[in-house]
Image (cartoon, rainbow, N blue to C red):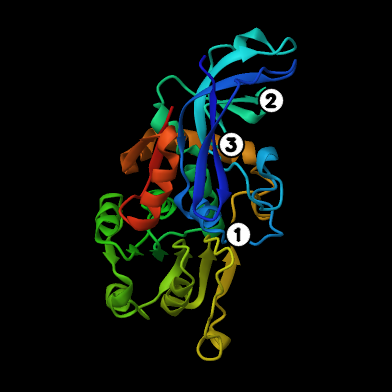
């Protein structure tokens, strides 16, 4: 081994790749050598742009990220690699296993084996790197509770929106439409099962024309990360409908018109975030069961088809500049 590399956010729009010795696992740890890791374009751009509230832990459910946001920091939560060494107290059968880890971008890291997800041989590294995205989409759909014959709309077709659309297309909905600013994303959305996809300037007219009845959706998802899209999603959701907000806006403020139709609409707006299982599901579901489902779905949906750029980790700073300026860069993978 020639040394370890770790991506570090050192200030607003400033990224470096630090070189350091390869760590040695403690007795109860394993050393993972990373092959690829997926960049979360929504959340990681908030970190990159310094748009995370200062008092907000990046992720309370991941030990490596359970600290308030402050530069310098490491970030990321979708690494795939091979166990290169095991501690003295670890079952030796872990050696050589291919695993997924919720860990920041790094070429080598030590971890408790209990925090790792062993991967089936048939699953490619690139599909496996999308496990966190698939789990997020699974949680969103579970919180939305789609029903037979419903009309559904998904606002935002970044990678989370696209995978959510793919999962929703498995349900017997009467209509599934999506909304996104960028034509290539709308085209991908249709290929994944959306019946139609529109630009935001076509909302609400095109959606109203598409949906039967009152011209509004029974179930809407706001996944764009754009506060303005929440107003559009609210306007297209019908009375007694459900609106699931999966976006993390960071420090961006949201302005909504709640003084008109909304007041009597009985629309239910709910937040959705992957770190918790909703109480209505908790009797039968836990995080392990949801993760198992997401792992199985990876093999069926092959989300690596959404990867648009594969970038060596040494060029990480270029990757974030690309994501910021190129909306077609749906999914970036780091290679090691």
Q: Say whether residue 130 is left or right of residue 258.
A: left
Q: Position of residue 225 (x, y in %)?
A: 48, 63
Depth check, mark 1 against mark 3: the one in front is 1
Q: Position of residue 319 (x, y in %)?
A: 40, 44
Q: Position of residue 105 (x, y in %)?
A: 53, 36
Q: Position of residue 139 (x, y in %)?
A: 55, 50
Above or below, 259 against 242 in this view is below
Above or below, 210 against 35 in this view is below
Above or below, 234 against 51 in this view is below
Q: CA distance from mark 1 to mark 2?
A: 28 Å
- Is there a contact, CB below 8 Å, between mark 1 and mark 3? no
| Closer to us: 280 or 153 | 153
For the C terminus, the image quarter is top left
- What residue did someone put label 3 on? 102
Q: CA distance from mark 1 to mark 3?
A: 20 Å
Answer with the quarter of the image where residue 123 lies. top left
Measuring 30% from the left and 80% from the top, which residue is drawn there? Answer: 205
The reply to whether residue 98 is visible in this rendering is no
Choose the circle earlier in sequence order: 1 or 3.
1
Depth check, mark 1 against mark 2: the one in front is 1
Helix, strand or loop under label 2? loop
| Closer to us: 9 or 92 | 9
Choose the circle earlier in sequence order: 3 or 2.
3
Q: Residue furthest bottom?
A: 260
- Is there a contact, CB below 8 Å, between mark 1 and mark 2? no
Q: What number is the disc on residue 52?
A: 1
Helix, strand or loop under label 3? loop
Neighbours of disc 3 within 10 Å: few (<14), some (14-19), many (20+): many
- What residue did someone put label 2 on? 112
Helix, strand or loop under label 1? loop
Q: What number is the disc on residue 274?
A: none
Q: CA distance from mark 3 to mark 2?
A: 11 Å
């Amino acid at each position: 081994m020639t040394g370890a590399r770790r991506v570090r956010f050192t200030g607003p729009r400033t990224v470096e790749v630090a070189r350091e010795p390869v760590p040695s696992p403690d007795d109860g740890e394993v050393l993972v050598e990373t092959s690829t890791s997926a960049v979360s374009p929504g959340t990681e751009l908030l970190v990159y742009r310094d748009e995370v509230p200062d008092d907000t832990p990046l992720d309370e459910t991941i030990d490596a990220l359970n600290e308030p946001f402050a530069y310098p920091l490491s970030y990321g939560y979708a690494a795939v690699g091979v166990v290169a060494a095991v501690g003295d107290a670890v079952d030796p059968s872990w050696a050589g296993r291919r695993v997924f880890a919720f860990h920041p971008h790094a070429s080598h890291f030590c971890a408790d084996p209990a925090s790792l997800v062993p991967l089936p041989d048939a699953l490619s590294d690139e599909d496996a790197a999308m496990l966190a995205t698939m789990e997020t989409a699974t949680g969103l759909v579970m919180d939305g509770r789609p029903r037979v014959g419903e009309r559904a709309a998904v606002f935002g077709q970044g990678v989370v929106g696209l995978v959510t659309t793919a999962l929703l297309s498995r349900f017997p909905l009467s209509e599934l439409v999506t909304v996104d600013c960028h034509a290539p994303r709308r085209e991908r959305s249709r290929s994944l099962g959306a019946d139609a996809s529109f630009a935001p300037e076509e909302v609400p007219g095109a959606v109203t024309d598409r949906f039967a009845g009152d011209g509004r959706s029974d179930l809407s998802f706001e996944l764009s990360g754009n506060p303005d899209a929440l107003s559009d999603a609210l306007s297209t959701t019908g009375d007694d409908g459900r609106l699931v907000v999966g976006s993390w806006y960071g420090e961006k403020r949201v302005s909504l018109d709640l003084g008109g139709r909304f007041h009597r609409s009985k629309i239910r707006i709910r937040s959705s975030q992957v770190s918790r299982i909703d109480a209505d599901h908790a009797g039968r579901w836990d995080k392990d069961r949801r993760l198992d489902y997401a792992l199985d779905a990876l093999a069926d949906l092959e989300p690596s088809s959404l990867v648009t750029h594969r970038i060596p980790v040494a060029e990480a700073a270029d990757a974030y500049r690309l994501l910021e300026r190129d909306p077609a860069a749906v999914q970036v993978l780091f290679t090691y």
